[in-house]
Amino acid sequence: YDDPVQIPILMYHAVHVMDPSEASNANLIVAPDNFEAQIKAMVDAGYYFLTPEEAYKAFTENALPAKKVVWLTFDDGNEDFYTIAYPILKKYKAKATNNIITGFVKKGNAGNLTVKQMKEMMAHGMSFQSHTVNHPDLSVNDKATQKVELTDSIDFLEDKLNTKVNTIAYPSGRYNQTTLDLAKKTYKLGLTTNEGLASAKDGLLSLNRVRILPTTTSKGLLSEIATDNK
Ligand SMILES: [Zn+2]
């Protein structure tokens, strides 16, 4: 490719039928039938689903493993990733990454993924990366606190899942220069909530994502993730 490749990194949170009591979080919840329509549309359009390692390779080598690629990411490690999203992903042989709040897993918070569930899903192509320990606003934390949030989350995941963590998704997309300086030492890729296609020209630790809303249709999604890679 002549120019830095563009890669659509989708950002999902929860996949379930929204309860009226969740109205204030509505933008984070995608209905299961809509989610399935989106996955099917990408499969039918010939998209290849990247792992975090493949994404890093694509950005650094400026080469893609397929003509059309997409990286599905989920934030927060909600349990519905296991109960609802994962069966759909498996049905279409799609791969996805969930960014985990490791302190919630450690405490065994209700509604969160467990280590056992993550291990099972890893055997079928799912990846688990860092979304810090406690989901703080990193941009207002001091350096020492940020360091613990960034490194303890890696240690937990690598120890419990016997996997290599290379990605951090900044909680609520909030970070500062200290975050980037620390992340550079321990991560290869950093995911923001800045809207758009991802490219190495934005910096590998401050990559854009495409936010999936409850109103995102599969047709709209396909047009949002179209790249002009050449
Ligand atoms: Zn989050």
Image (spheres, rainbow, N blue to C red):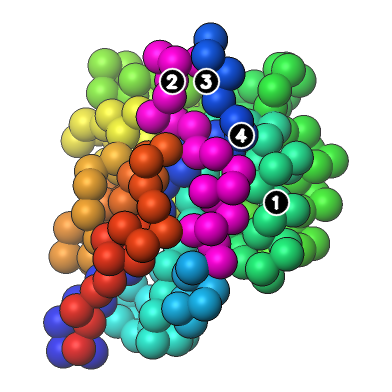
The residue type indicated by label 2 comes to Asn
> Element at badge 4?
loop
Q: Nearer the viewer, mark 3 or mark 4?
A: 4
124 shown above or below 189 = below
Image: magenta residue range: 22-40
Q: Name the residue under label 2.
A: 25
Q: Residue at x 22, y 47 (%)?
A: 195
Among numbered discs 3 and 4, the one appearing first in the sequence: 4
Label at residue 86: 1
Among numbered discs 3 and 1, the one appearing first in the sequence: 1
Q: Where is residue 201 in the image (x, y as percent from the top left)?
A: 16, 65
Cβ atoms under marks 3 and 2 closer than 8 Å: no
The residue type indicated by label 1 comes to Tyr
Q: Name the residue under label 3.
A: 134
In the picture, residue 63 is in which quadrant?
bottom left
Give the Cα distance between marks 4 and 2. 12 Å
Cβ atoms under marks 4 and 1 closer than 8 Å: no
Give the Cα distance between marks 3 and 4. 24 Å
- Is the residue marked 4 within 8 Å of ligand 1, measured from its CB? no
**Towards the viewer: 201 or 27:** 27
Among numbered discs 3 and 2, the one appearing first in the sequence: 2
Give the Cα distance between marks 3 and 1. 24 Å
Among numbered discs 4 and 1, the one appearing first in the sequence: 4
Q: Mark 4 points at which residue?
A: 16
Q: Does the magenta stretch include residue 185?
A: no
Cβ atoms under marks 4 and 2 closer than 8 Å: no
